[in-house]
Amino acid sequence: MKNISAYFVRFVVCVAGLLSVSGYAFADGHGSVKRAVKQEAAAETPLPAGLHYYVAPRLRAQHTVVADVCVYGGTAAGVVAAVQAAEQGHKAVIIEQGAHLGGMTSGGLSYTDIGNKDAIGGMALEFYKRCGKNYNEPVEWKFEPHVAERLMNDWVTSHHIPVYYREFVQTVTKTPEGRILALTTESGLTVQARVFIDAGYEGDLLARAKVKYRVGREDNKQYKETYDGVQVRNLHQFTHHIDPYLVERDPHSGVVPGIDLSPLPPQGSGDKRVQAYNFRLCLTGVTANRLAFKKPKGYDPERYILLGRLMEAGFTKVYDKFDAIQGKKYDKNNDGPVSTDYIGENWAFPDADYKTRERIFQAHVVYQMGLMWYLCNDPHVPATIRADMREYGLCRDEFQDTGGWPHQLYIREARRMVSDYVMTEHNCRGEAPVTDPVGLAAYTMDSHNCRRFIEGGYVRNEGDVQIGGTPPYPISYRSIVPARDQCDNLIVPVCLSASHIAYGSIRMEPVFMILGQSAALAADIALRDNIAVQDVPYTKLQPALVAAHQILAWVPRSKPGPAPAGK
């Protein structure tokens, strides 16, 4: 009888889905089967035509570009690296996978994550001062995306740096000794250079150059850490008992999408899982500049069942992480157990081919766009929350080629190089001083959730870590260059050599800019002395860094404020 009952429930749920498509609601957002009620069906809207991670390139006639420094990735780190290289008198070129410069800095992360402002120097600080000048302020950390992109473009244009957009590296040509001679993109563009800088979030150049890297979380035992690997903790966690099944208390109905049914390993165990991605939305409450959230094509209401049950239990934190920025706008980030992070749906991304990444990218768009529409329109959302959420929308004057939606997916972590020096939790705690600092990091040891699982019959999140309370600490030059026997003319300022939890502290946009500038200064010495990047003497690099106003040692100047949670 139990099996017959289970099949009947599944049949009812399937019929409910069909009726829902026809404009009827048969099951409420919490999985309780009810009689069909006529409900107005909202039309699904196609996604903006320009909103893509990957578009298959048009093959070009064979074309070769020759440069001193090739920067792969037009992130903020990549722009800074190219500009610094140009200022040193070198011919630099940027190869960018997307259609915009600036990465997350111009792609929605406008409420800058800062551990301590006094730890930021060099061109990174110069960028934020330029943002300030736009608003008649000495410095501005909470800027509009279009301002950041304009400043990045101006920087590159004023230094006459060529940028090749929508180019995806396909192959890398190396000598038997491990030196990169050229990279070739899918379109047929070849770039020859003496030094290469991988400034992308994905580490695609380092991977194709056969440089050792890791994806996922190390076991705590590997580097004698505490906060790496599997972590079940109390922040961004379910604080109510939320049922995980499509029909409450009925395991035979199946689990809600996004729940991982594999056994949970012991705390601190290593795995291949990756912390969640999202889009940092730029929102406004100004009616004239507000674009209403639309129901995306592919909308799946089952993705929001857990949030519905949370709100039924009294959860109201959907308003959190609306961080005010310039222009009467807000940077909307993830917050809480169910929010804009698409937990568990990005594990394949780091090593995936470009077409698969595009599918993952689009799935993130549909999930997050659907979430915002759900909060504004679904009848299972309390009326007060729906009314308040409708006061906000995307900005008409931001991301105009993608319908107000950010063009950059927040790839918090992908590949991480493994070099002769690995930054670990011990560096973050100030327990492992380095002799060759190229900049400071200052944020908390931070990871977003990696998965959802079932414990004791209820849903739980796993992976979130937020451990702070330590002063800024130095990052080793050896952590941004590969092992000598793997490649001797590549520098990696973004996907640097760090454990998962140390990377979670380092991975902030100001730090990436700092490391991008330091990478270019090291490249300058390697080029002038015709040596491997591993042979750049710190006795030469350190004075160059100081002259460029990089901060290499922490001397307290002001009391740091509390760090914003949920990067």
Image (tube, helix red, strand yellow):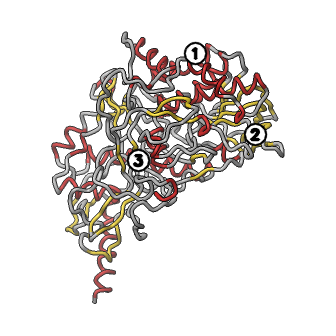
| Residue at 39 percent of width and 62 percent of height | 267
Secondary element under disc 2, as helix, strand or loop, is strand
Q: Is residue 338 left or right of 426 when viewed as pictured?
A: left
- Dividing the picture into quarters, in which one does residue 333 lie? top left
Residue 184 numbered mark, or none: 2
| Residue at 47 percent of width and 38 percent of height | 506
Q: Position of residue 129 (x, y in %)?
A: 44, 15
Secondary element under disc 3, as helix, strand or loop, is strand
The quarter in which the N terminus is drawn is bottom left
* Circle 2 crowding by C-alpha within 10 Å: few under 14, some 14–19, many from 20: some
* Tag 3–tag 2 contact (CB < 8 Å): no
* Circle 3 crowding by C-alpha within 10 Å: few under 14, some 14–19, many from 20: many
Q: Nearer the viewer, residue 298 or 455?
A: 455
> What residue did someone put label 1 on?
547
- Dividing the picture into quarters, in which one does residue 393 lie? top left
Q: Amino acid at mark 3?
A: Ser
Q: Amino acid at mark 1?
A: Ala
Residue 8 numbered mark, or none: none
Q: Position of residue 322 (x, y in %)?
A: 29, 35
Q: Position of residue 346 (x, y in %)?
A: 48, 53
> What residue did someone put label 3 on?
447
- Judged from this view, the residue extending furthest toward the bottom is 1
Q: CA distance from mark 3 to mark 2?
A: 34 Å
* Between discs 2 and 1, the one toward the N terminus: 2
| Residue at 68 percent of width and 44 percent of height | 483
Q: Nearer the viewer, residue 294 or 222?
A: 222
Residue 404 appears in the picture as rendered: no
Secondary element under disc 1, as helix, strand or loop, is helix
Q: Identify whether 381 is placed above or below 162.
A: below
